[in-house]
Every structure is written in structure tokens, then in C-alpha cells.
Image (cartoon, grey):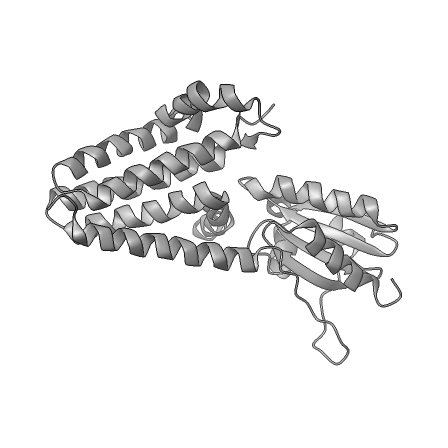
Amino acid sequence: MSTPVVDPRGLRFAAAITSAVLAIVLVTHSPVREVVLAGQLAVFAVGAVGSPSASPYGWLFRTLVRPRIGPPTHTEDSRPPQFAQLVGLVFTVVALVGFVTGATALGLVATALALVAALLNAATGFCLGCELYLTSRKLARVLN
Amino acid sequence: MMISMTGAYVLVAAVLLAGVIAVGLRWKNGRFTGATGPGESPVATLTPADLGAALGERATLVQFSSAFCSPCRATRVIVNDVAGRVEGVRAIEIDVESHLQLAEREKVMRTPTVFVLDATGRVVRRASGLPTRDQVLAAVADALGPSA
């Protein structure tokens, strides 16, 4: 295999947990919400820098879920989901900065947008990085 | 107050937004559109030179793919399946980044994008996003014409 691959069911599982965590961030008060958000930020960071399977949610999937459901029928290129983790990281950094500096509206909106992306991925397998890829490549060519 | 009310409203709004986007994507993905009757503006024609391969005898399925395209794999499976089932239909896959001019000329904005060409290479139908097999079969039937 030339490209690194992941079990797509693990990705959906991780996106579902991410959605739940971000929902908790939205409905809790300080300081719980900042602590939970910081935790999710760390998870995104690990997934973006390492790979989605390095993330704690990936570990949970492999330990708890996968033994019960057997091997995947197909695997996916892991680079788009890795990019999605990076997008999630950016949004959670902005959100955390918003909450910590008192710009609560910014914190809520940034968290909500990350939640929308995670929900879409968990429920429909929607790949945000995939949709953005061509446009970003076009931009890169225009700028060079 | 145990729960942040503002946060709860934002959560509901986010879930609704995700729902709206999901419905929009479901509507859009695999929806084949294209010029049908006579008297419409001229449609594009793809040649073997454009594609780097010969056209199918009766129709051609052209899939535009790219790196970073999770749905492209599943689309390829469906497109190859339909080409295998229908006599005289060939499947060709094009990497957008090694066919930039073609992709730009044909205004391919998203991958996967699937074109259905008739026997002369005229683009009869096109769709973006992952299609179902039935959507592809119906589009191919359109390209084969009323005699199909």
C-alpha cells in the first residue's frame, strides 16, 4: 500500500464521540466547558499530527468495538480524515481562545461549526477535506 | 443553572444546520442533469484525445477523480459495475490534477464527477458526488436513447 489507510468505521465512531463531546462543550458552563474543549483539542492535535488511528477515539474503537464486528470490508485513504482533524483543531483553538478571553459568542459559534462537521461525518460519512481539496489546489496554483 | 441555555439553543441550531446540509447533499449527490432535447445550447463533446482512451461503442462513463476523495472509490466500483452490465458501455477514470485543462474546460468543481457520453462523445448527463447504481443506470439509459 502506497497510501496509509484506516478502517472507515473507526472514523465514523470517532466522529460520533467528537460530536457528543462538542455538544457537551456547548451546554456546559465554565470551567467544565473549557476543560472538555481542551481535551477535544488535544484529541484533534494527535489525530492531525499523527494519524486518525493514533487518536484516543481510534484506540477506543480498536479495543471496544472492532473485536465485536470483525475486520472492515474496505479501507480508506487516511489523509482526508487527517486533514479533517486539522480543521477541527483550528476550530477548537479559536473556540477555546474565544471562551477564555470572554468572547463567548465566538467560542460557541466555532464549537458549533466543528460540531456540524463532526455530525455530518458521523451520520453520512461526509468528508469536508475532500470537498475542499480541489478548491484549495486551485487556489494554490493561482497563488504560485 | 446546570445547563447553559444559550449553549443549548446553539446546539439545536447546529443539529438543524447539519440536518439541512445532509438533506442538501443527499439531493445533490448523484443527481444527473444535462441537455436533453434539440434546440438547446450546444453541449460539450469529449474526444479520445481528451480522455486518453477510446470511447465506448454505445456510451462512455467518465469519472473525474482526485486524491483526497473518499467517495471516489465507491463511485469507481459502481461505475465499473454498470459498464460491466451494459453492452457497449466503457468506463474511463480521469485524475483531475493530471488533466487540469480538461477539468477546467468542463467546469469540474468537485470529485467525484461522472459524465455520461453518447456514442459520439457528446456529454449527455453529468452528476457530482457519490451516485447510486440506479442513478448511473438511468443516466446511461438516457445516453443510449429511446432505442435502448
Q: Quadrant of residue B9?
A: bottom left
Residue B26 lies in quadrant: bottom right
Is A94 situated above or below A68? below
B139 to the left or right of A117: right
Q: Is residue B23 left or right of residue B90?
A: left
In the rendered view, tell whether residue B121 sits above or below residue B52. below
Using residue A71 as the reference point, say whether residue B124 is left or right of it. Answer: right
Vertical placement of residue B121 versus A35, above or below: below
Q: Quadrant of the N terminus of chain A?
A: top right
Please name the residue shown 51% across and 49% down the image: A134
Residue B90: % across, % down:
81, 48
Q: Looking at the image, which residue is at 42% across and 37% down?
A: A83
Kindly identify the residue that appears in the image at 28 percent across and 33 percent down.
A40
**Figure check: B52 above or below B31:** above
Residue B101 vs residue A16, the one in the foreground: A16
The outermost residue toward the bottom is B39
Disc count in the image? 0
- Report x, y in % for residue B103: 62, 55
* Residue A126 visible in the current orientation: no
Task: Give the percent coordinates (x, y) of residue A94.
Answer: 23, 44
Q: Is residue B80 visible?
A: yes
Which one is in front, B120 or A108? A108
At 45% from the left and 52% from the top, the residue drawn is A139
Tell me where residue B99 appears, x and y as whole percent.
Answer: 65, 49
